[in-house]
Amino acid sequence: MQLQDVIANMDPISLDEMDSVKLMNRTDTKFGFSASLLPEILKACSNDYRILEVNTVRASAYRTLYFDTPDHQLYLDHHKGKPYRFKIRIRNYIESNLFYLEVKVKVKGRTVKSRIKLSGFETELSEKSRAFIEKATGEKLNLVPVLWNGFHRVTLINRKEKERLTIDFGLNFENMKGEKEDVGSLIIAEVKQENRSRSSKIINVLRQYGIRESGMSKYCVGTALIEKELKSNNFKSKLLAIEKIKKAA
């Protein structure tokens, strides 16, 4: 069973139709698993979701530039499990040729996302971008670009519930020194809901495959894999799981 065959047979949904499920204030539940399982997992829940299609493309390409302080404060806040933390990035939605500066603020288990449109990547943030970040976070941060990330994404919309599912694959990372890490055998799936619900079809399917929630973000995955001098002991079990997936591929 091939991934392209599964997603080609799903009913599509357009960007305009998806507006009602933007979920800018939401709960996120993340899962990591082997890419070899993805086609059968999607097949098992294909009747419950519609798939986002943009310009006839169903597996969209993304490129992201993450920002942090020179001493990686934002990464370390996540590593410490701080209940109030940020993620700051510029993302290029390649098929639609759009660039957004995006700020995700995690507050006691909920994610609040805000963004503004840009004309392209900024390796040095403009005054407008810095002002936007300060307003979104409530803090004046000394931010520098730290990590590039590329991947493909399939986005699914629940037919009945206010729920969106993103499935990222073909992940690769590169820091500003040109050091690279490829984790193409890893899938990172994220269930986005208005209010956390364990009755979700995809969550139940993942449980059937023995896949449990894993809270580490793509930014933290890439940073921990490349910047080996940074603390990562709290991510040890997740990094070992990723290494096991890579070896089995």
Image: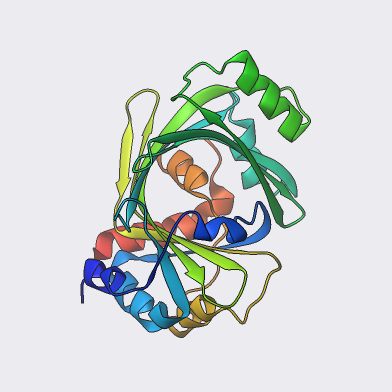
Q: Position of residue 215 (x, y in %)?
A: 57, 58
Q: How many numbered tags mark residues here?
A: 0
Can residue 68 be seen at all in this image of the molecule? yes
Q: Residue at x 46, y 74 (%)?
A: 49
Residue 188 appears in which quarter of the rendering? bottom left
The residue sitting at the front extreme is: 16
Lateral position of residue 10 relative to residue 223, left or right: left
Q: Position of residue 80 (x, y in %)?
A: 67, 46
Residue 132 appears in which quarter of the rendering? top right
Judging depth in this view, the residue of 76 and 30 nearest the camera is 30
Q: Quadrant of the C terminus?
A: bottom left
* Residue 12 vertical position relative to residue 86 in the rendered view, above or below: below
Judging depth in this view, the residue of 173 and 234 nearest the camera is 173
Q: Residue at x 32, y 73 (%)?
A: 37
Q: Quadrant of the N terminus?
A: bottom left
Q: Position of residue 210 (x, y in %)?
A: 46, 80
Lateral position of residue 68 relative to residue 186, left or right: right
Q: Residue at x 47, y 19 (%)?
A: 123
Q: Residue at x 48, y 58 (%)?
A: 238
Q: How is the image coloured?
A: rainbow
Can residue 142 be seen at all in this image of the molecule? no
Q: Position of residue 234 (x, y in %)?
A: 59, 52
